[in-house]
């Protein structure tokens, strides 16, 4: 049995949440390939997608914007500072109404992105570049929800 790790999540508003976990894994490319976050590590993400595993082997997923991860080398403490709303997500076996809604949103945003990219290719407006970047970020998050069948419907154990 491995040592328990204390995970502290600290928002930009200094809202703090603490979990006791067995491991934290990072995902950067929306593939089912997870990287174990190890002692002595630092990481920074514009949009972070990660999962934690508790002592009961239950996995909870998170997507956080502007996240900075610190895993102290000499302790079993991980701190994540972030600028977002903390929303625990859980992988589902079936398609839920929440996931259906996310899939519809994803389809619409991909179409809008294609249209704006075509306008951008014609150099019609520089405003489109900002909008395209915003859409890419939203699409990335929606893909995470749909590819991993994530839904926030279960209740988290907050400390």
Image (tube, rainbow, N blue to C red):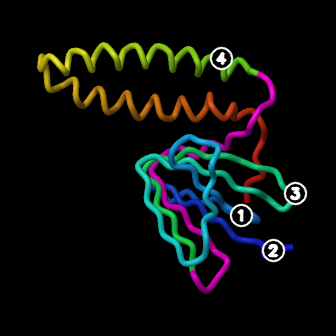
Name the mark on residue 2. 2
Most common secondary structure along the magenta stretch: loop
Q: Disc 2 versus disc 1: distance between alpha carbons?
A: 9 Å
- Name the residue at 64% across, 82% down: 75
- Of marks 2 and 4, which one's residue comes earlier in the chain? 2
Q: Quadrant of the N terminus?
A: bottom right
The residue to which callout 3 is attached is 56
Residue 140 located within the stretch drawn in magenta: no
The residue to which callout 1 is attached is 23
Packing grade of label 1 (10 A; few <14, some 14-19, many >=20) is: many
Residue 129 versus residue 21 in the image, above or below: above
Kindly indicate whether the residue at mark 3 contacts the one at mark 1 (C-beta within 8 angstroms): no
**Residue bounds of the magenta highlight:** 73-94
The residue to which callout 4 is attached is 100
Q: Is residue 144 left or right of residue 46?
A: right
Query: How far across and down, in percent of the image, does residue 68 sit?
Result: 46, 61
- Name the residue at 82% across, 51% down: 58
Q: Disc 2 versus disc 3: distance between alpha carbons?
A: 13 Å
Q: Is residue 110 left or right of residue 36?
A: left
Packing grade of label 2 (10 A; few <14, some 14-19, many >=20) is: few
Residue 81 located within the stretch drawn in magenta: yes
- Of marks 1 and 3, which one's residue comes earlier in the chain? 1
- Of marks 4 and 3, which one's residue comes earlier in the chain? 3
**Is residue 13 visible in the rendered structure shown here?**
no
Q: Disc 4 versus disc 3: distance between alpha carbons?
A: 29 Å
- Of marks 2 and 1, which one's residue comes earlier in the chain? 2
Between 32 and 108, which is closer to the camera in this rendering?
32
Kindly indicate whether the residue at mark 1 contacts the one at mark 2 (C-beta within 8 angstroms): yes
Q: Quadrant of the C terminus?
A: bottom right
- Of marks 4 and 1, which one's residue comes earlier in the chain? 1
Kindly indicate whether the residue at mark 3 contacts the one at mark 4 (C-beta within 8 angstroms): no
Kindly indicate whether the residue at mark 1 contacts the one at mark 4 (C-beta within 8 angstroms): no
């Amino acid at each position: 049995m491995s040592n328990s790790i204390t995970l502290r999540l600290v928002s930009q508003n200094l809202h703090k949440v603490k979990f006791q976990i067995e491991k934290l894994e990072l995902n950067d490319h929306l593939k089912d390939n997870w990287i174990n976050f190890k002692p002595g590590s630092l990481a920074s993400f514009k949009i972070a997608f990660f999962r934690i595993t508790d002592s009961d082997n239950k996995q909870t997923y998170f997507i956080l914007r502007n996240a900075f991860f610190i895993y102290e080398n000499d302790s079993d403490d991980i701190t994540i500072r972030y600028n977002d709303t903390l929303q625990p997500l859980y992988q589902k076996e079936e398609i839920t109404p929440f996931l259906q809604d996310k899939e519809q949103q994803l389809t619409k945003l991909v179409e809008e992105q294609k249209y704006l990219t075509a306008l951008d290719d014609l150099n019609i407006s520089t405003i489109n570049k900002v909008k395209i970047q915003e859409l890419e970020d939203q699409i990335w998050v929606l893909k995470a929800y749909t590819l991993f069948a994530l839904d926030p419907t279960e209740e988290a154990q907050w400390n």
